[in-house]
Image (spheres, rainbow, N blue to C red):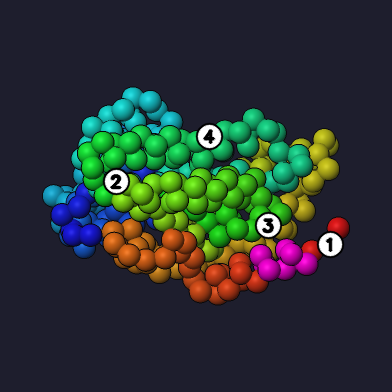
Amino acid sequence: MATTKTILITGGGTGFGEGVSLGLAKAGYNVIAGVHISPQVTSLRRKAKEAGVENKLRVEKLDILDAYDVKNALTWDVDILFNNAGYGESGPVFEIPVDLLRKNFETNVFAPLELSQKFAAKFIKEKKKGKIVFTSSMGGLVAPVGLAPYCTTKFALEGVAEALQQELAPYGIQVQTINPGGYFTGFNERVGETAFRWLDDTKNFTKKADLTGQLDLLLGNDSGRLDPEEMISAMIKIIPADTGKYRNVLPQFIEDFLKDHQQKVWQKTI
């Protein structure tokens, strides 16, 4: 796709979203970075000016759970929607309060689906061959103990994306997923902390010390603290491209691990 295309990024105020917003703008694309809260608008506009891309990077408040923000976003002329906004809950699935998991699904599955539905309809009515990209996760294909509540939302998002890819193809609308491994943006560590606000050693079977140990195994090593610039650089190429893989897992050793894991599931016994 030409650099004249406009790319809307949700969750553009932190982590991958911020890096990709700046990177795509530097690459010459017109970018609208939708950020969750107003202070992030000021912060990212300042960074855009410092990077000399203020004319290519427009920063707007876009809370995907705010109906007024979403209604406003639908007035923008967009060619590519990058659904990147999300957050995560951690802890044991068999004990997590269901209202917390339901809230996580609302942000990670239902809100991006609704936004995608609305932009897909807009693309179809305008006869525009648009594109919709989702930030999924390696956690959309494996659910390790400790981070599994968040992973269940990404499993659901994988189903949404797979269906949309088939349904929207006849209209010329492309759909892709991007599945990062353990990149050190701080996101995974924040997810890991969430369970400790409700876990109670006097009530729960899962003890805080045991969960801490499990999270350390997942995140406290080199494979859980990869340089995010590798992923950001890949996203900058994948998102605007006219061709490419439907599912994009990085780094390669994580793709290999996931393929091996899924094969082993077929031999798993109870």
Residue linked to disc 3: 144
Badge 3 element: loop
Give the mark, 2 or 1, whose residue is nearer the N terminus: 2
Residue linked to disc 4: 106
Question: How many angstroms separate mark 2 from mark 3 (CA)?
Answer: 31 Å
Question: How many angstroms separate mark 2 from mark 4 (CA)?
Answer: 20 Å
Q: Quadrant of residue 198?
A: top right
Q: Residue at x 64, y 30 (%)?
A: 99
Packing grade of label 1 (10 A; few <14, some 14-19, many >=20) is few
Q: Is residue 203 left or right of residue 15?
A: right
- Of circles 4 and 1, the one toward us is 1
Kind of residue indicated by mark 2: Leu
Q: Which mark is residue 8?
A: 2
Residue 3, placed above or below residue 39: below
Where does the magenta region start and end?
261-267
The foreground one among 109 and 88 is: 109
Badge 4 element: helix
Give the mark, 4 or 1, whose residue is nearer the N terminus: 4
Q: Are marks 1 and 3 in contact (CB under 8 Å)?
A: no
Give the mark, 2 or 4, whose residue is nearer the N terminus: 2
Residue linked to disc 1: 269
Kind of residue indicated by mark 4: Glu
Would residue 262 be counted in the magenta stretch?
yes
Residue at the far left in the pictured view: 55
